[in-house]
Each structure stands twice: as C-alpha cells, then as structure tokens.
C-alpha cells in the first residue's frame, strides 16, 4: 500500500505532506467501515430491541442474553472471535466485512438499549389508543411509536456513531488497512512515528467534528412537531 | 339475541388481587349504561376487557354474538390476534387522558385508522373526518396539533377519532376526569348528543353523577369487583337499596357541596 508513494523525510512539513496521500487511502477505509458498521448497528439494534420486547420468552431471553454478551465483552475479543473462529465453521468473510460486522454487532447491542429506552418513554396510552383504533402492530410501530421515538434518541445514537468511528482503528488488528495501520507502517519504515500518528489524530479530530456538526443538522431536520423533548 | 354485550361469570385477577369476581353484566343493543362506584371496584376493567386491552382468565364475554375467547386460543387473551382484531372492530374507546397522537395533526389523528385499518381512500377519510370534527365543533382546528388544544378540545377530537371507526359500542373511561372544571361541560355536551343515537351502544365510567342520571338508561353500581345494584338512574340516585350504594352516593354528593 505504501509502495508507489514517495516519502520525503527532509523536513517535518514535507514529511507530513508526503504521508498525507497514504493516510487518505486509509481514511477511505475508515469511513467505509464506519458507515457499514453504523448501518448494521442501526438495523440490528432495532431488531434486538424489538426481539427483546417480544412477549414470547423463547425469543426475548436469547435476545437479552445476546445483547448482554455483546455489551459486556471486549470488542477486540469479539473481533478475534469472528475473524479466527468463524472460518473454522466454514464462514469466511473478508477482513474488512468481519471488522464491520464486529463493530456493527457491538454497537447494535448498545443501540438496542437506546431504542428500548426510547420505546419505553412513549406513554402506555399511545399503545392503548393504537389498539383501540385497531392498528396492526407493524403500523403502530411505524406511525405511532417510531416517529415519536426518533427525535428523542437521535442525540444518543449520534454519540454512538462518533464513538464507533473512534473504534475503527481496532480493525488494523485483523489486517484491515485503515489509517492507523498505515501510520504505524510508515513509522516502521521511517522510524518517525510522531508525524504520522499526529496526522491520524488530526484527521480523526476533523472527522468527528464534522460528524457532530452533521448530526446537529440532522437533529434540526427531523420532524419534532408536537413531540415534547425532555 | 337480546344481549348485545354479555359478561358471564368473569374472573379477572392481577396476581393475587381479584379485580372482577364472578362478574355478570348484559347490555342491550343501543343501551346507554353508566358504571359508577369507588375506585378499584372494577368499572374501568370492564371497559378495558371489552376493548381487548386486558385479558381475563375465566368466564365468557360476548359482543354481538362474538365470543372474546377462542377455542384453543393462546394466553393471555385466549384468542388469536386475528380474532381480537375482529372483535375490536366493533368497539371504540375514549380515554381519560385523551391519548391523541401528539405528532399528528388533528386531521391525521382522525384519518390514520380509517385509511390503514378500514382501507378508506384519502378523500373518503378526509370527508369523514371533517364531518365528525364539525359534529364535535372542532372543524376550525383540523390542522392544529393536539398540544395546541385545551384538554376539552383534545377530548372532543378523541371522541371524533373513535367515531371515525364507526364502532357499534363506544366506551368512555372517565372522559372528563382529567379536565379543568370549566372544560367539562363542552365534552359532556358532545357525549350527550351521542347518547341520542339509537344504534350506538355506550358504556360510560364517570364520576359526574348528574350527567349519568341525565344520559343513561341504566346505572350500575360497582363494589369489590361486582355489580351490587343496578337499575334506572332515578331509582339508583333517588332510592338506592343497597347500603354501599347509599354510602357511596352520599359521600359523592357531600363532596360536591
């Protein structure tokens, strides 16, 4: 990956400038992993939350167990598990997707709690009114519960997005070539760690700041009319 | 088939607490029945069972010939969701705390279920909603959101919303208890005009005794999970026979003075 890029170590500024294109290649991977992981977390998290609320113990108990397990064990362990153990059972995913799955699953467990709190914050009367009007369960979630829940949970979900972004370097442990991985390789070659690592820090800082800004924008767009936000 | 609604030997428990014990009640088609009694005596539970918001363990409930329990139905409701939906289609409910959907306009509140459940076209649902809103005197607020309305206005919208589903039975669960005193009248007058509808069966839980006397064909006094006395309003309010009814009514009237 570093091949083909010239590294100029004559001065700090020149060094920083010459490693930037290399790091930007890693940035692409970082952003893709973040987006894929976040998409998985959003969808699977909602599924977890709904399964956990199931009136059937056969469904809600395993869901609760899975959520607790994912929440209370280290991400790195889960990542190694997916990367090293699953292939033994014939499930072989590319390293990148294994990483996204690990990130997505752990954050799905976190987000399921956010969803759950969001659902539980809706007064019981809303469910009862939906029942009294004979709305189906799907329709009740779709037009009554979720629209009232979304504006309340967006800030918490956004925090997890930023937090997940900062967890992406963990993918370097399973050979995914993202920013931190490249920075350390540059360091290994040039024995200069300060500049590439500082650059990675800087890029992350810019990235998280942009994300926070975007989230604030999204919070403003989401319809909140009539919904009281505590 | 004179009994439009019937409860026979119904038992309802929350854990060890018996809410309804060996409960019987029959209501004729079009009858207006008021349920009164001390809190915790099971009045609201009767409505909540009819609305399928609460299951019951023993006994039989039927509505227009439909049994609430189904042979082979699974707990807690002892009936499939499909069956419950059929039963529920006959019943509408007005809640103490209105329970309008706060993120939808008044219009949308009235159109959602007729469109998604009854399959009405948008213009049909709109037409139905506007007719009902003008009936409850709320047509000017069709585009408002529930949070912009007073409690009395919200409850009038909630009544219109329940009527939009064309229920055969309308249940009122303390419809004025959450309202400021000066707003009670506007809601009662809407309910009063509904009471003139011959085809609509009404069950009303209320603490407004004068109103109960005025609109109901029959008053049922509840105590300890059963009806201890029932009859025409004049009889219950003027010449109650049961000592519990007497002491309850005198304590209520005391409070009103």
Image (tube, helix red, strand yellow):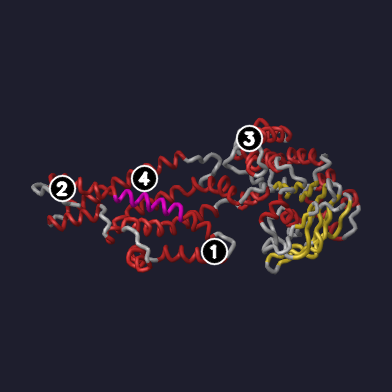
Q: Residue at x 61, y 44 (%)?
A: B101
Q: Residues within 10 Å of mark 4 (few under 14, many from 20)?
A: some
Give the label, 1 or 4, closer to the camera.
Answer: 1
Tag 4 near tag 2, CB within 8 Å = no
The numbered disc on residue B122 is 3
Q: Position of residue B133 (x, y in %)?
A: 69, 34
Q: Are marks 4 and 3 on the same chain?
A: no
Q: Are marks 4 and 2 on the same chain?
A: yes
Q: Residue at x 37, y 63 (%)?
A: A91
Closer to the camera, A111 or A2?
Answer: A2
- The chain letter for the residue carrying disc 2 is A
Q: Residues within 10 Å of mark 3 (few under 14, many from 20)?
A: few
Left or right of B251, for residue A199: left
**Please, what is the dominant secondary structure of the magenta stretch?**
helix
Residue at mark 1 to residue at mark 4: CA–CA distance? 36 Å
Judge whether B242 appears above or below B115 on screen: below
Earlier-in-chain disc, 1 versus 2? 2
Judge whether B191 appears above or below B221 on screen: above
Considering the numbered disc 4 on the image, is that residue within a helix, a strand or a loop? helix
Considering the numbered disc 2 on the image, is that residue within a helix, a strand or a loop? loop
View extreme (front): residue = A90
Q: Which residue is mark 2?
A: A5
Please tell me whether residue A31 belongs to the stretch shown in magenta: yes
Give the label, 4 or 2, closer to the camera.
Answer: 2
Please tell me whether residue B224 belongs to the stretch shown in magenta: no
Residue at mark 2 to residue at mark 3: CA–CA distance? 62 Å
Considering the numbered disc 3 on the image, is that residue within a helix, a strand or a loop? helix
Considering the numbered disc 1 on the image, is that residue within a helix, a strand or a loop? helix
Q: Which residue is mark 1?
A: A59
The numbered disc on residue A212 is 4
């Amino acid at each position: 990956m570093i091949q083909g890029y010239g590294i100029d170590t004559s001065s700090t500024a020149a060094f920083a400038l010459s490693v930037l294109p290399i790091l930007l290649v890693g940035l692409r991977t970082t952003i893709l992993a973040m987006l894929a992981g976040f998409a998985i977390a959003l969808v699977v998290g909602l599924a977890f939350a709904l399964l956990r609320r199931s009136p059937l113990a056969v469904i809600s108990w395993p869901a609760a167990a899975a959520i607790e397990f994912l929440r209370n064990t280290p991400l790195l362990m889960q990542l190694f598990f997916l990367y090293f153990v699953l292939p033994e059972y014939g499930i072989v995913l590319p390293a990148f997707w294994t990483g996204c799955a690990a990130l997505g699953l752990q954050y799905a467990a976190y987000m399921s709690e956010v969803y759950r709190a969001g659902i539980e914050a809706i007064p019981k009367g809303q469910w009862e009114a939906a029942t009294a009007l004979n709305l189906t369960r799907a329709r009740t979630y779709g037009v009554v519960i979720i629209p009232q829940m979304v504006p309340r949970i967006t800030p918490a979900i956004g925090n997890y997005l930023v937090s997940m972004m900062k967890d992406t370097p963990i993918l370097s442990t399973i050979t995914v070539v993202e920013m931190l991985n490249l920075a350390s390789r540059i360091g290994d070659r040039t024995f200069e760690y300060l500049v590439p690592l500082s650059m990675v820090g800087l890029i992350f800082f810019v990235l998280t700041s942009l994300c926070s800004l975007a989230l604030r924008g999204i919070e403003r767009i989401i319809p909140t009319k009539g919904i009281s936000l505590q | 088939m004179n009994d439009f609604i019937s409860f026979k030997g119904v038992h309802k428990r929350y854990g060890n607490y018996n809410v309804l014990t060996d409960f019987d009640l029959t209501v004729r088609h079009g009858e207006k029945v008021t349920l009164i009694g001390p809190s915790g005596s099971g009045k609201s539970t009767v409505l909540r069972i009819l609305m399928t918001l609460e299951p019951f363990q023993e006994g039989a409930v039927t509505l227009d010939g439909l049994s609430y329990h189904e042979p082979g139905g699974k707990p807690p409701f002892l009936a499939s969701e499909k069956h419950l939906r059929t039963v529920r289609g006959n019943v509408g409910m007005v809640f103490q705390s209105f329970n309008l959907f706060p993120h939808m306009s008044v219009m949308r509140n009235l159109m959602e279920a007729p469109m998604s459940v009854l399959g009405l076209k948008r213009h049909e649902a709109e037409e139905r909603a506007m007719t009902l809103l003008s009936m409850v005197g709320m047509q000017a607020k069709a585009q408002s959101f529930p949070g912009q309305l007073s409690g009395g206005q919200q409850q009038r919208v909630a009544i219109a919303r329940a009527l939009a589903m064309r229920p055969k039975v309308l249940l009122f669960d303390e419809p004025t208890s959450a309202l400021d005193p000066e707003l009670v009248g506007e809601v009662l007058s809407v309910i009063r005009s509904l009471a003139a509808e011959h085809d609509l069966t009404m069950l009303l839980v209320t603490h407004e005794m004068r109103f109960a006397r005025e609109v109901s064909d029959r008053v049922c006094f509840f105590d300890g999970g059963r009806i201890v006395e029932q009859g025409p309003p004049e009889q219950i309010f003027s010449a109650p026979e049961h000592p519990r009814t007497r002491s309850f009514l005198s304590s209520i009237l005391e409070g009103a003075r």
